[in-house]
Image (cartoon, helix red, strand yellow):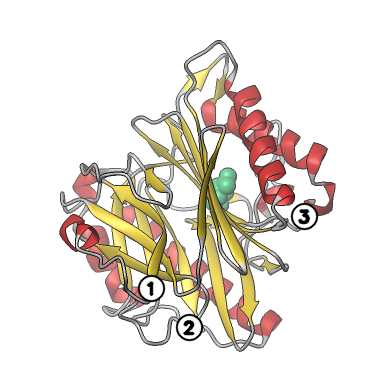
Amino acid sequence: MRNLAHQNTPIGWDYLTPQSYLALAPGGRERPVAAIVHGDFAPPPRPWPQIHSHLPPLDGAARVEVLSSAAAATFEREDGFDLLLADDFMIAAGRFEEAGGESLAAGTERLYATLLRLIADRGYPHLLRLWNILERINREQDGLERYRHFCIGRHEAFARMRPDLAERYPAASAVGAGGGGLCVYLIAARSPGTPIENPNQVSAFRYPAQYGPRSPSFSRALVKQWGAHANLFISGTASITGHETQHAGDLAAQAERTADNLETLVRAAEQRSGTRFRLGDSGSMLKAYVRRAEDYPLVGDLVARRLGRDASVLYLRADICRAALLIEVDGVLFA
Ligand code: 3EB
């Protein structure tokens, strides 16, 4: 684990093959605190959250995204939620299966309310990073896109339980999968981070009503200082300038604009925090979400050319929360 020497923050990050995941030595210095399984692989139960993303890697081989820590950590389950408690942070994961009669907005609000209660009860109220994976995110349901139903439920939970987060949201991604209902997992901390916005984009929480009755509740990025080290959590970033989608239908131009936005965001985070982050070095753990499987490996060349060949980029087949977007990139940087 943590082959990368400069990942000195409390949470390490790696993309492993199923084989090397299964071979992880239980007595090692670094232990997993969460594993996100991408693709066709069903590991045996482990004492940490194992989350199935329903997002297959584009190269066809299953991959396990492993978050790790050198510190002692406790695994708990409560009401179907998986919790991992470490010194400085906790991880929580839950799923809304959409099996009963509950609407997507109501189920989203309930899932978020439970997650917010769990992190507050255990003393980690500061949300750093959220991942949302929503089955058939672009499908219309009761006259509204499912992503927009989700945004309503998330907004209601935040407004009701965490009014302190208005315009100071955590970093987040929201992407679409072929199954799995709504899967949400998060990192929360005992002390706060600093939300970052992209000066070339309208903040998502201020998007005009044409994008849905409730704006998306996330910040473009968040810097978390951990003593002398820091993480930059980068939200899902796409070909959007202002609030408008750019280059509909043009994969190469969207990839360029996405890289521009990532660079702008990293510069904004550096200015705000005084910490230097190196986008594209070997410590950049990125994920590229690609709508059309046939765009891989072209999209791999585009991303690698702009972000360098050293970055760890996991390419996943996913839907993106605006129908015209073909690619979105998120990730975490280490300083
Ligand atoms: C965008 O910039 C693209 O709803 O949590 C990116 C990252 C997007 C997170 C979310 C949505 C979300 O608006 C979509």
Front residue (pair 214, 126): 126
- Above or below, 169 against 321 in this view is below
Tell me, for residue 93, which label it has, or none.
none
* 70 or 258: nearer the viewer: 70
- Say if 218 sits above or below 113 in the image: below
Amino acid type of disc 3?
Glu
Instruction: Inspect the image, locate mark 1, and give the three-letter code of the amino acid beneath it.
Output: Glu
Crowding at dot 3, Cα within 10 Å, few <14 / some 14-19 / many 20+, comes out as: some
Mark 3: secondary structure: loop
Q: Nearer the viewer, mark 1 or mark 3?
A: 1
Total tally of numbered discs in the picture: 3
Which residue is most to the front? 27
Q: Which mark is residue 167?
A: 3
Q: How far apart are marks 2 and 1 (CA)?
A: 12 Å
Mark 2 closeness class: few <14, some 14–19, many ≥20 residues within 10 Å = some
Q: Name the residue under label 2.
A: 8
Q: Image point 24% across, 55% down: which residue? A: 63
The residue that mark 1 highlights is: 30
